């Protein structure tokens, strides 16, 4: 299902402000994406005000381009109620789509504006066919998959689902899977999920810049990307300058056109254009990203993430080359000026025709207004989007028309034409299905008493050798084991042992699902077939769809990367089959109390996963050793972060340097009424596990306990995030 010349791939450019938008349009972008002053994943960009957004939408349509708005952050309850007022005027103006991350936002916008296309942001970390299908069922029209996917994976997803895919072709790369990074949030309260990432990955660790990815550049592999079925090529850069936007857009426009127009000619890239991309902005050189390699040192600016760009004169020159000339819409004009009649201007453009009547034309007393005088004034279209290809003038010989009247007629007539063209795209927000409390209540579970009054304790272990210690305490009601920790030789005995001790068995599926993992992993299929699991923990949309399709009868528990920071997200997850939602780790206690989420799982203890990455710290620093285990990286302050290797599926999880530990739980229990509390062991030693289990055994049995005296954090329970 390869694309043809009739399906030329969309070139999608970023705009951090209106100047960048104009540069993108002038340089040849087919579409532009931008954020307003609310809810975008680039909170520190200049962004657009409401009037600029409406003007950008109209201008895009005048030039047969599209305009997409970013609402790709996690919203809190006090924010999501503002969506209608924010989106309605843009919807009416003809907004072509909204890029979203939050499941609550998807639910609300789908209810408010059923005709508004929604695009799943790369922040949703969609990595396989199942995730695409789940979002398609929710009405998503386009998906920006995780940047870590290979060309082969992208092609398989497209062929299996037919979904519109939007993929990055140039710009900055995150070290972590987007949407699965809490590094900036946990360390400094600036959440990447809220558009405020402080980029801790660009800092040194172990004395090197081992988490700092090079920038993406794909000119050389554009034909392969087109062949994979990608519908839209996306340029990263809403924090970048208008010179960057113009140059990168202009160069990629050239090569997309070269490919589609080449016919039988060989595609090639000129070295000069590669150099221009390096000159405009690069972070220690460029790479092809993940399209043809899984990971590697070549993608990381290990020695120093140096930033290079041309001097001011270079940048000005590049801007002039690609965006210095205003683009115009060719228009025909007919002017009729007869004595005693109103001046008549007819404009024809893009299938639209408008007629404007000016003042009554008077007879000339001294100097008559001739046809060339009329032409001169009507042809002054500078500052507008229009340019006349033809001006047909019919006029009497002895007439007089003031220059001011001609200018006003031209100006107001062209505005009339602009409004009529824009009218083809306009909608009526009042006709949209307004999302209201009735709709919200209809998707909430009917049984409000389905959860236990007394919270359960869920001890989660990442290694099988932790099991006997955890079972030795009478603390846990449930034991969760990472499915990657079991194998053919122990899966049955482990499950039996846990059940024999009167505890429920949960299995945690991987944080990342790729390459058909759920279908090819024999242990997952075995667990489902034998009915061994009382519950399964999922951390992505792929796993959720998989369990729904197989009608899993146990408890489905969503993990911490499935964010439910507002009531609409809570409702959406429950309607999709999630039984227990992990309380968001980025909300403070006051915000958690304000959620309708009751009966979730609260993390009392554990090292929060700061990043989940397709890169491998061990491989970057030395070599691939193909062995699950733990590496450590140390920041400039001496804090040591464990990096857990998942070599089977080839990803790293970087954990916080200290665990989150909450010991005062009475208020939590009263306010949240949780289904369960989680105690999660990852890299702890045997003695550390005993210490923590003993502590919480005392807490839950209402015995006196002492502060453990170990370094720990309360997470965001008090402060929250911006």
Image (cartoon, helix red, strand yellow):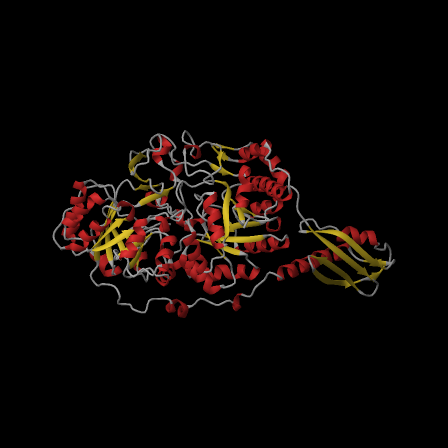
**Residue placed most toward the observer, 190 or 483:** 483
Residue 453 picture location, percent across and down: 21, 63
Residue 482 picture location, percent across and down: 28, 48
**Position of residue 327 in the picture relative to residue 98 (left or right):** right
> Relative to residue 334, is residue 522 depicted above or below?
above
**Residue placed most toward the observer, 410 or 644:** 644
**Residue placed most toward the observer, 339 or 505:** 505
Q: What residue is rendered at 52% in x and 35% in y? A: 281
Dividing the picture into quarters, in which one does residue 394 lie?
Answer: bottom right
Query: Does residue 399 appear in the picture of this structure?
Result: yes
Q: What residue is rendered at 68% in x and 57% in y? A: 350
Q: How many marks?
A: 0
Q: What residue is rendered at 83% in x and 62% in y? A: 338
Dividing the picture into quarters, in which one does residue 669 lie?
Answer: bottom left
**Position of residue 555 in the picture relative to residue 167 (left or right):** left
**Position of residue 309 in the picture relative to residue 553 (left or right):** right
Residue 177 picture location, percent across and down: 40, 45
Which residue in the rendered view is the most extreme toward the left? 703
Query: Does residue 183 appear in the picture of this structure?
Result: no
> Relative to residue 687, is residue 583 depicted above or below?
below
Dividing the picture into quarters, in which one does residue 700 lie?
Answer: bottom left
Residue 442 picture location, percent across and down: 38, 69
């Amino acid at each position: 299902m390869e694309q043809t010349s009739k399906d030329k791939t969309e070139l999608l450019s970023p705009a951090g402000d209106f100047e960048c938008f104009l540069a993108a349009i002038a340089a040849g972008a087919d579409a532009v994406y931008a954020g307003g002053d609310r809810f975008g994943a680039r909170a520190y960009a200049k962004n657009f005000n409401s009037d600029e957004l409406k003007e950008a939408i109209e201008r895009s349509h005048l030039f047969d381009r599209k305009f997409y708005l970013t609402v790709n952050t996690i919203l809190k309850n006090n924010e999501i109620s503002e969506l209608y007022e924010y989106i309605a005027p843009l919807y009416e103006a003809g907004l072509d789509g909204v890029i979203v991350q939050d499941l609550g936002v998807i639910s609300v916008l789908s209810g408010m504006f059923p005709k508004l296309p929604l695009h799943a942001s790369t922040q949703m970390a969609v990595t396989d066919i199942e995730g695409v299908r789940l979002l398609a069922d929710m009405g998503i029209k386009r998906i920006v998959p995780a940047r870590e996917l290979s060309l082969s994976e992208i092609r398989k997803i497209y062929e299996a689902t037919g979904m519109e895919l939007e993929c990055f072709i140039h710009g900055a790369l995150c070290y972590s899977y987007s949407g699965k990074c809490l590094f900036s949030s946990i360390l400094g309260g600036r959440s990447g999920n809220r558009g405020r990432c402080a980029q801790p990955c660009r800092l040194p660790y172990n004395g090197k810049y081992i988490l700092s990815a090079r920038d993406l550049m794909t000119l050389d592999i554009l034909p392969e990307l087109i062949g994979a079925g990608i519908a839209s090529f996306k340029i990263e850069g809403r924090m970048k300058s208008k010179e960057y936007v113009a140059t990168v857009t202009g160069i990629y426009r050239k090569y997309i056109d070269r490919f589609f127009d080449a016919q039988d000619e060989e595609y090639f890239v000129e070295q000069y254009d590669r150099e221009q991309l390096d000159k405009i902005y690069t972070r220690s050189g460029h790479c092809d990203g993940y399209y043809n390699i899984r990971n590697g040192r070549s993608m990381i600016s290990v020695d120093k993430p140096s930033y290079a760009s041309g001097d001011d004169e270079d940048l000005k020159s590049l801007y002039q080359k690609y965006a210095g000339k205003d683009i115009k819409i060719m228009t025909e004009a007919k002017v009729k000026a007869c004595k005693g009649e109103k001046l008549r201007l007819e404009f024809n453009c893009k299938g639209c025709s408008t007629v404007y009547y000016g003042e009554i034309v008077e007879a000339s007393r001294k100097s008559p207004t001739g046809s060339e005088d009329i032409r001169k004034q009507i042809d002054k279209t500078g500052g507008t989007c229009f340019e006349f290809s033809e001006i047909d003038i019919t006029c009497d010989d002895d007439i007089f028309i003031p220059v001011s009247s001609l200018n006003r007629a031209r100006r107001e007539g062209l505005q009339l034409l602009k409004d009529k063209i824009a009218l083809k795209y306009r909608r009526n927000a009042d006709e949209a299905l307004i999302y209201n409390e009735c709709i919200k209540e209809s998707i909430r579970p009917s049984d409000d008493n389905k959860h236990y009054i007394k919270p359960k304790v869920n001890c989660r272990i990442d290694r099988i050798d932790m099991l006997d210690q955890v079972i030795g305490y009478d603390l846990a009601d449930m034991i969760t084991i990472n499915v990657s920790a079991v194998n053919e030789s122990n899966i049955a005995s482990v499950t039996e042992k846990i059940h024999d001790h009167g505890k429920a068995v949960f299995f945690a599926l991987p944080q990342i699902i790729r390459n058909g993992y759920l279908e090819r992993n024999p242990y997952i299929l075995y667990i489902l077939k034998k009915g061994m699991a009382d519950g399964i923990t999922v951390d992505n949309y792929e796993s959720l769809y998989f369990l729904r399709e197989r009608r899993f009868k146990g408890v489905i528990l969503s993990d911490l990367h499935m964010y439910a920071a507002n009531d609409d997200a809570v409702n959406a997850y429950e309607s999709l089959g999630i039984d227990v939602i992990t309380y968001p780790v980025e909300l403070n206690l006051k915000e958690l109390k304000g959620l309708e989420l009751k009966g979730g799982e609260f993390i009392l203890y554990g090292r929060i996963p700061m990043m989940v990455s397709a890169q491998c710290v061990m491989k970057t620093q030395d070599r691939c050793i193909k062995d699950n285990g733990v590496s450590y990286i140390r920041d400039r302050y001496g804090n040591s972060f464990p990096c857990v290797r998942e070599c089977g599926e080839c990803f790293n999880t970087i954990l916080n340097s200290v665990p989150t530990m909450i010991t005062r739980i009475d208020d939590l229990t009263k306010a949240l009424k949780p289904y369960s509390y989680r105690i999660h062991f990852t890299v702890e030693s045997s003695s550390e596990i005993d210490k923590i289990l003993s502590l919480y055994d005392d807490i839950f049995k209402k015995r006196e306990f002492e502060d453990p005296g170990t370094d720990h954090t309360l997470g965001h329970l008090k402060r929250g995030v911006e």
